[in-house]
């Protein structure tokens, strides 16, 4: 299977205006994709109280994050489905269909009935819409980057597809702006009750504009040429997954770059928001403001590293980003804690907390099933309640031998409290210097912004070149299918599950930094595999 060639002379016929139109139309859909993801993630805590059973807020929140993850599970299925259509019927019509499905589902979330009015049908409807979104997004990204790449000269492919990659930060900033703007127009009680729906409903305008722009596009010249030459794959799924050369490249792409790309992105651009609010205990408005500033400053790095990969090759820029992530995430997040809540960081070092319990007999187990089922008996275990209360307040602890006759006990600054008593725990922690929230006057906002910019740069080193790299890795007649599948396994499974598993690991391990083991291990392993086995691409000599 050999890709159809686009010569430099043929690519030069595209004017700067035409290039801008292609990039604009393609980026709109991916901005929409990330806007949808971020408003869902940012508003999960509000949605969980309205659409899920209200008797256990922690279970409802984790179930809401689970619904978020469910949308990612079906992304690879969407990648195969729409990849097949894109390779058989064309790029344009396929990624026009995906944006209609994705945008329509996003808007409908804003109109879902509450659990109080329709019971379980509320969250079931949410899961269904998330599944539709996941299917559509499975074909959205591949169509966008392929369409841009197949309109690009080889020497500009990384630069132009880099504009697709920057849409992740733009989608985040747009979502935060809409959320903050909505909150500014009403009191918090109204926002919690119904105002969270507004950012979803507003997306209707984005959908209409995106469809209008994409409907005016012409088909990709590479696909048109393949069709005219009779070189389209008769069965892209068979040619992609049942022929070893293409399947081998898919596996190498997945375990050599896209799994790590998903982990770096969702750590440095999404989980950091959860960490700053839940572990560092900075108020939501301040977190959103700092995130916007940091990511806005760092966003040009996506285009820069795409451009740089046109000159140096893509592989080693991505591998460097993966290894930097594996080595630096733990100290970066520790620095965020020190900058955002210095009193908490100081108390953690000077006045450690000890939990007395038998950690080996199952009394302290916090199972995944317990996190999703509100009536599960794990939630009644005193040790589990103590762990949730401590980690939920950003407090690390160490285990010690149990006290006779007590299922759990906590010791801090020489004071031991038997059993679990939330008020008594809180009083003892406050006396020991553990704050209930970050002091706004003590937050080092400049340092936090700097760290967010650095995290964005690390993400951009992997994410900026990866679109052009994947396009060049696969032949044109199966490109839509072959590219979309490893990308959405990496982003949808390894990345999409990160918020859930990182939150779970922190709760289960009794350490607010425990969730970072998830991205650290994935980026380290992916970096090793990619360094040893992936080919490098130098676009100056790589036509499509």
Image: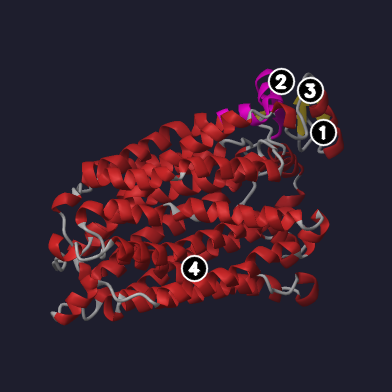
Q: Are marks 2 and 3 in contact (CB under 8 Å)?
A: yes
Residue that mark 4 sits on: 134
Count of picture labels? 4
Q: Which residues are magenta?
A: 335-357
Q: Which mark is residue 432?
A: 3
Is residue 125 among the parts visible in the rendering?
yes
Whether residue 185 is situated above or below residue 106 in the rendered picture? above
Q: Is residue 507 visible?
A: no
For mark 1, give the secondary structure. Answer: helix
Cα gap from disc 2 to disc 3, whole angstroms: 7 Å
Q: Are marks 4 and 2 in contact (CB under 8 Å)?
A: no
Residue highlighted by disc 1:
426
Q: Report helix, strand or loop for mark 4.
A: helix
Crowd band around label 4 with a 10 angstrom C-alpha radius: few (<14), some (14–19), many (20+): many
The residue that label 2 is drawn on is 351
Q: Is residue 166 above or below residue 144?
A: above
Callout 1: few (<14), some (14-19), or many (20+) C-alpha neighbours within 10 Å?
some
**Residue 410 placement (x, y as % from top left):** 76, 30
Asked if the residue at tag 1 contacts the one at tag 2, i.e. Cβ–Cβ closer than 8 Å, the answer is no
| Label 2 crowd (10 A; few <14 / some 14-19 / many >=20) | some
């Amino acid at each position: 299977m050999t890709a159809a060639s686009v010569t430099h002379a043929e690519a030069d016929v595209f004017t700067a205006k035409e290039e801008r139109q292609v990039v604009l139309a393609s980026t709109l859909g991916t901005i929409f994709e990330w806007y949808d993801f971020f408003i869902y993630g940012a508003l999960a805590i509000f949605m969980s109280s309205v659409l899920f059973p209200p008797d256990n807020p922690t279970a409802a929140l984790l179930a809401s994050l689970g619904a978020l993850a469910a949308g990612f599970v079906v992304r690879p299925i969407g990648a195969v489905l729409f990849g097949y259509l894109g390779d058989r019927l064309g790029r344009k019509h396929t990624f026009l269909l995906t944006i209609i499905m994705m945008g329509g589902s996003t808007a409908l979330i804003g109109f879902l009935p509450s659990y109080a009015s329709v019971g379980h049908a509320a969250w079931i409807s949410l899961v269904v819409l998330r599944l539709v979104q996941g299917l559509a997004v499975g074909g959205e990204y591949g169509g966008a980057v392929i369409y841009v790449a197949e309109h690009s000269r080889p020497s500009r492919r990384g630069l132009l597809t880099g504009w697709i990659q920057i849409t992740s930060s733009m989608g985040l900033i747009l979502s935060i702006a809409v959320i903050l703007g909505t909150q500014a127009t009403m009191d918090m009680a109204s926002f919690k009750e119904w105002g969270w729906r507004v950012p979803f409903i507003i997306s209707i305008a984005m959908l209409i504009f995106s469809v209008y722009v994409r409907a005016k596009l012409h088909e990709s010249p590479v696909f048109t040429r393949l069709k005219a030459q009779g070189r389209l794959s008769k069965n892209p799924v068979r040619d992609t997954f049942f022929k070893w050369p293409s399947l081998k490249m898919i596996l190498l792409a997945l375990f050599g770059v896209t799994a790590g790309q998903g982990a770096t992105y969702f750590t440095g651009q999404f989980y950091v928001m959860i960490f700053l609010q839940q572990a560092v205990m900075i108020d939501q408005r301040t977190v959103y403001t700092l995130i916007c500033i940091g990511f806005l400053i760092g966003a040009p790095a996506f285009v820069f590293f795409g451009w740089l990969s046109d000159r140096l090759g893509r592989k080693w820029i991505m591998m460097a980003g993966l290894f930097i992530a594996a080595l630096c995430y733990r100290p970066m997040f520790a620095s965020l804690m020190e900058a955002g809540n210095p009193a908490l960081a100081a108390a953690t070092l000077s006045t450690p907390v000890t939990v007395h319990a038998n950690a080996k007999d199952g009394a302290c187990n916090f199972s995944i099933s317990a996190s999703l089922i509100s009536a599960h008996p794990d939630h009644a275990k005193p040790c589990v309640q103590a762990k949730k209360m401590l980690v939920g307040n950003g407090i690390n602890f160490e285990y010690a031998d149990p006290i006779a006759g007590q299922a759990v006990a906590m010791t801090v600054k020489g004071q031991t409290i038997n059993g679990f008593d939330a008020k008594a725990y809180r009083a003892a922690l406050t006396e020991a210097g553990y704050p209930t929230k970050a002091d706004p006057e003590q937050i080092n906002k400049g340092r936090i912004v700097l760290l967010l910019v650095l995290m964005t740069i690390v993400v951009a080193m992997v994410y900026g070149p990866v679109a052009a790299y994947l396009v060049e890795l696969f032949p044109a007649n199966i490109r839509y299918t072959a590219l979309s599948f490893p990308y959405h396994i990496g982003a949808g499974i390894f990345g999409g599950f990160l918020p859930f598993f990182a939150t779970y690991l922190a709760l289960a391990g009794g350490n607010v930094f425990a969730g970072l083991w998830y991205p650290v291990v994935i980026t380290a392993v992916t970096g090793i595999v990619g360094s040893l086995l992936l080919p490098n691409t130098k676009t100056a000599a790589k036509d499509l």
